[in-house]
């Protein structure tokens, strides 16, 4: 009996190891695909967006995150084009039920998805397009605006925990710099002021105390039970 039990436990252990290995390989492949998609989106987005300009009331110098100096300020795609926004999934507990309006923003379309700008995280060497609306399928393509606006000082951006997206934001510490360039080419510079972990079902905490921060980045932990959250304030 003991031998049979030992054999059974050994088989279960092997199955669990194989499952963990499969998950690791799958996650790496997903990360690689996400990195490739991000690069393609950025290339198209930069061709449409105007040259970067500083937000004149906040800073004097432009930290131009674009490597090319001859970026074209091409026309937007049709603003009436339908956005490809699949049903929400894993982040549903954070869904904003108030139906906020972002009519004053400039949008750009790449492969039927709409984008509001580019986020740059110097410490992590990341340059990321930010989609205008979020859902679980959208997050597999690029980081997404969860709620808020730059001008409103309450912008929240969500992303998957791919290494090429927000998988490493837990490495950010107070004083680190974040840069967001909106659809009008205006550059906003932020400083990280805090990091926290928020329970997955506590959606209200994600938007709480917005008077103390201007930008939030968050992603799931690997278990999906919590959200790694970074708060930042606009440099004045």
Image: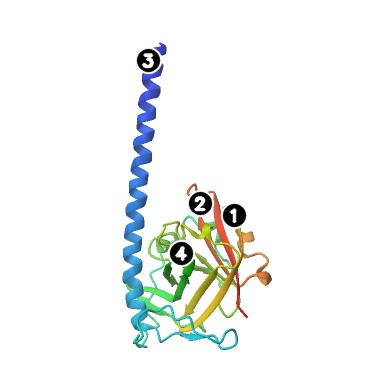
Q: Locate residue 220, reporting x and y percent.
A: 50, 54
x 55%, y 55%: residue: 227
151 lies above or below 162: below
Quarter of the figure that contains the C terminus: bottom right
**Residue corresponding to mark 2:** 221
Q: Nearer the viewer, residue 36 or 189?
A: 189
Q: Secondary structure at mark 3?
A: helix
* CA neighbours of label 1 inside 10 A, class few (<14), some (14 to 19), many (20+): some
Which circle marks residue 223 in the picture? none
The mark nearer the N terminus, 4 or 3, is 3
The mark nearer the N terminus, 2 or 1, is 1
Q: Secondary structure at mark 1?
A: strand
Q: CA distance from mark 1 to mark 4?
A: 19 Å
x 60%, y 55%: residue: 198
The mark nearer the N terminus, 4 or 2, is 4
Q: Secondary structure at mark 2?
A: loop
x 43%, y 78%: residue: 65
Q: CA distance from mark 3 to mark 2?
A: 38 Å
Of circles 4 and 3, the one toward us is 4
Q: CA distance from mark 1 to mark 3?
A: 44 Å
**Residue corresponding to mark 1:** 197
Of circles 4 and 2, the one toward us is 4
Of circles 1 and 4, the one toward us is 4
Labels 2 & 1 near each other (Cβ < 8 A) = yes
The mark nearer the N terminus, 3 or 2, is 3
Q: CA distance from mark 2 to mark 1?
A: 9 Å
**Residue corresponding to mark 3:** 4
Q: How is the image coloured?
A: rainbow
Classify residue 208 as left or right of residue 125.
right
Could one spot residue 149 in this view of the protein? no
Q: CA distance from mark 4 to mark 3?
A: 51 Å
């Amino acid at each position: 009996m003991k031998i049979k039990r030992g054999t059974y436990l050994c088989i279960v252990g092997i199955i669990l190891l194989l499952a963990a290995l499969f998950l690791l390989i799958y996650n790496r492949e997903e990360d690689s695909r996400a990195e490739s998609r991000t690069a393609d989106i950025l290339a198209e987005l930069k061709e449409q967006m105007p040259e970067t300009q500083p937000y004149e009331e906040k800073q004097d110098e432009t930290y131009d995150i674009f490597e090319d100096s001859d970026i074209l300020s091409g026309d937007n795609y049709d603003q009436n084009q339908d956005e490809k926004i699949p049903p929400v999934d894993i982040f549903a507990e954070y869904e904003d039920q108030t139906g906020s309006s972002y009519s004053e923003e400039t949008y750009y379309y790449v492969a039927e998805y709409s984008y509001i700008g580019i986020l740059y995280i110097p410490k992590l060497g990341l340059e990321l397009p930010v989609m205008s609306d979020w859902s679980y399928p959208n997050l597999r393509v690029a980081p997404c605006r969860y709620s808020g606006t730059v001008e409103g000082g309450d912008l929240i951006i969500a992303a998957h925990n791919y290494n090429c997206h927000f998988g490493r934001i837990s490495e950010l510490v107070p004083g680190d710099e974040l840069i967001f360039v909106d659809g009008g080419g205006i550059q906003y510079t932020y400083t990280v002021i805090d990091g926290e972990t928020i329970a997955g079902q506590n959606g209200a905490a994600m938007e709480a105390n917005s008077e103390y921060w201007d930008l939030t980045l968050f992603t799931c932990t690997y278990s999906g039970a919590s959200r790694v959250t970074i708060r930042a304030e606009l440099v004045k």
